[in-house]
Image: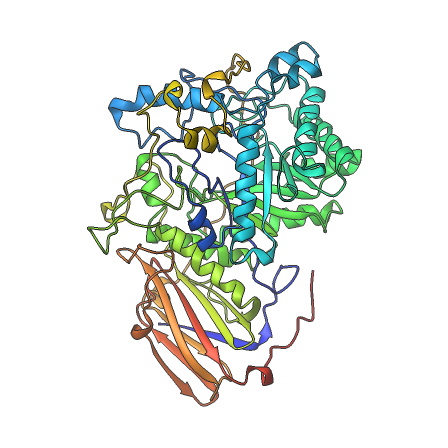
Amino acid sequence: MFRIQIDPKTPLSSGNRSAEVRQVNGVNGSPISFMPGFPDLQDQFRQLGLIHIRMHDIYGVCDIEPYFDANRAANTNQLLPNVPQDQQDRARNFIADFNNARVIFPNAVKGMKKFSSSLAKKDANYAPTDYYLKQTIDNIDTAASSASGGEIMFRIGRSNDGGWELPSNFKIYAELVGELVKRYSSDLSKSGLPRKVKYWEIWNEPDLPFFWNTDDVSRYYEFYATVARKIRSIDADVKIGGAGAAFGLNIGGAFLDGLLAYCRAKNVPIDFLSWHFYPSETADPQNILDAADGVAAALDAYGYSEVESICSEWNVSPYASYLMYSKVQSAQNAAFVASTLIGMNKCRVDHAHYYRGDGGAFGLFNDAFNPAIPNAKAFCSYVAQTFKLYNEMFDTPQLLSTSDAGRTGVSILAGSSSGKINILVANYRIDKSLPQMYTPPVGNIYYNQHYVDTGRSLAEITDDWSREHWFGGQDPTTLHNNNEVPQQAWAPTLPSSSPYPIRTRDYAQSAGGVHLVINDLAGRVDGIKAHRLYEGGDLSGVMPPDVSQELAYWYDGNDYIIEDGNAKESTVTLYTITLRDWHRFQPLPPTHKR
């Protein structure tokens, strides 16, 4: 077993601005069903404590001017791999029709081409986005942990497969963004939102040509500056940033250092720098430290130490396939995810959004049967249970110092509050096949996924619930989209840094579980509980099974020992210790904050 020391009187010293549990458990997607065939998950989001939501890839919702073409040859449609083969043509056409009916500005392209702001704004279709934003904010604010301050991030741009050519008129595009900032931030009287959208992210992955089709990076700088200045002129209190760079580890690259240098030189507003983390070459969760440290160094180098660092997308892999959707929901990936969440607390990451939180591609929820209860439907995935365990750490927000576990497969996060200590332990062995889209899951374990229901055409969506839920109460057959643009061949991808480094581990130490030593707790423990997720474990609720009976625990002088031989590879375990007389043994306050 791997021995880990925990000091309940010494706060964690790290790259954080404070030694408290970080709000890195945000997600992409929506708690609201985003399409027929996908579940509504408002209650589940509340149970998981998902209160930071990046509104991205909701397919028409929050999209300014995309056009979805069912016959576009280069599409990378994430929604199709799970659709039965005999339904794929119908699904492809239905998805395009459905998404196009929900775009906010259906005449944006015409208006930009004709240099007409009024034409670009004509027939604005706010209702679907109004509905999703209001319902999502309401859901955040009723979550049990909403006191910690959940927020919406509005991704300015397009959902996946909405087209990759640049907007033809940056000034008019910025005016369209301005209309949204007025509606969703500065004046809520028309949208009916209970509070403002605070974060505005300008575009998604412009370093990839299938989102931003040019290798002339100055075009993005110009676009960012035009949109950012427009937002700031309307609402001085919102937070503006970009670029949602796909290559999070690209030290010195155009969309990290380059954007910061441009903003500094041109006095362009930037309140956060956003980047993505997909270590598909290494499958190593510790690479989050490399990416975050690179971003932090860039922010400091350009005089932006107070600008937030936001990982606005992350997972073990970005590759969409039938195989991958099961792999990312496995206990193996749950251990990767927990290790990454733990790592984000030990470097400079202010917020993060997992891709993704709902029942869509890469999502936390599926349509599988429970491996532990074959005659019952699964409630969620093992990765969803990871988010539940991480959310429990907010009950003990003061992070504690632990001995180094990074040289093994174990990652650990310990926190305290009055009367309680929580210890989150992930045990993950690097598997370079995990992120690969054509390799099967370990043990050939598959989970049935949700997929688009093509049982009705757009014209057959006539009931009030469906129209309210997906179209903000409108008849979808009355909604149009005139934003079709010929798509050119992809430009060359800009150079990026070498892949993440591969870190070595001694798995012999951690393969047999953990031996936790909590210093100086003699005579103060009232009780101990443990919950663990593992492949084949119960998925009927967001909280994984209670495994307290599997532990051995005792006093050794002034130390309290927990021995757990089942905290093995591909597991995540939360240990909760309740204490008495805690007021006499409070940890010392942090002596250093960034």
The image shows a total of numbered marks equal to 0
Q: Which image quadrant: the C terminus?
A: bottom right
On the picture, is 513 further left or further right than 132? Answer: left
On the picture, is 149 further left or further right than 428? Answer: right
In the rendered image, the vertical position of residue 139 relative to residue 200, given as above or below: below
- Closer to us: 339 or 216: 339
Where does residue 279 sit, x and y in percent of width and height?
46, 44
Q: Which image quadrant: the N terminus?
A: bottom left
Residue 354 visible from this viewpoint: yes
Judging from the image, the colouring scheme is: rainbow
Q: Quadrant of residue 211?
A: top right
In the rendered image, the vertical position of residue 490 relative to residue 280, given as above or below: above
Where does residue 139 sit, x and y in percent of width and height?
52, 47
Where does residue 374 sit, x and y in percent of width and height?
20, 51
In the rendered image, the vertical position of residue 380 relative to residue 231, given as above or below: below
Where does residue 34 sit, x and y in percent of width and height?
44, 34
In the rendered image, the vertical position of residue 237 relative to residue 587, given as above or below: above
Residue 497 visible from this viewpoint: no
- Closer to us: 107 or 66: 107
On the picture, is 392 further left or further right than 268? Answer: left
- Closer to us: 36 or 477: 477
Q: Quadrant of residue 23?
A: bottom right
Q: Farthest front residue?
A: 464
Q: Farthest top residue?
A: 114
Residue at point 63%, 48% (across, down):
309
Q: Farthest left residue?
A: 375
